[in-house]
Image (cartoon, rainbow, N blue to C red):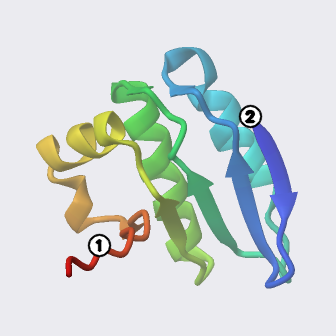
């Protein structure tokens, strides 16, 4: 799990292979400690995340609630198919801002 601050002053979390009980509290704490007055938005890249369990979902919900209290926002970037399936099954796609993977342009036939 890597944490960086982007040019537009958002905390970006990348290299998240799984979001499970073993790392969910670390994610929540690292995000909480990294937020400042200048950096209140958080982007969590789920494109490489192969598995999300209930503790992982709980961490995302806790981060979202904390950010809303401080007028910030959480975006889930390009969730993998398995991560998106869990998010949709729990209907949390209605709660989170999700930035899908850009669609590849189709081939034009002749």
Can you identify the residue that label 2 sits on?
A: 1
* Residue density around tag 1, few if under 14, some if 14–19, many if 20 or more, within 10 Å: few
* Residue depicted at 50% across the width and 18% down the height: 21
| Label 1 vs 2, first from the N-terminus | 2
Q: Is residue 109 above or below residue 28?
A: below
Secondary structure beneath dot 1 equals loop
Name the mark nearer the viewer: 1 or 2: 1
Q: Tags 1 and 2 in contact by the CB under 8 Å rule?
A: no
Can you identify the residue that label 1 sits on?
A: 106
Picture quadrant where residue 97 is located: bottom left
Picture quadrant where residue 101 is located: bottom left
Q: Is residue 68 above or below residue 48?
A: below
* Residue depicted at 79% across the width and 85% down the height: 8
* Residue depicted at 50% across the width and 40% down the height: 59
* Residue density around tag 2, few if under 14, some if 14–19, many if 20 or more, within 10 Å: few
> Which corner quadrant holds the C terminus?
bottom left
Secondary structure beneath dot 2 equals loop
Q: Residue furthest top?
A: 22
* Residue depicted at 83% across the width and 72% down the height: 6
């Amino acid at each position: 799990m890597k944490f960086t601050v982007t040019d537009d002053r958002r905390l970006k979390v990348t290299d998240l292979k799984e979001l499970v009980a073993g790392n969910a509290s670390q994610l929540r704490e690292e995000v909480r400690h990294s937020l400042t007055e200048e950096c209140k938005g958080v982007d969590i890249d789920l494109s490489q995340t192969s598995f999300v369990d209930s503790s992982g979902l709980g961490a995302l919900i806790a981060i979202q609630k904390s950010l809303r209290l401080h007028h910030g926002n959480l975006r889930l970037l390009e969730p993998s198919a398995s991560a998106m399936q869990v998010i949709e099954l729990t209907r949390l796609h209605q709660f989170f801002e999700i930035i899908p993977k850009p669609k590849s342009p189709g081939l034009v036939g002749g």
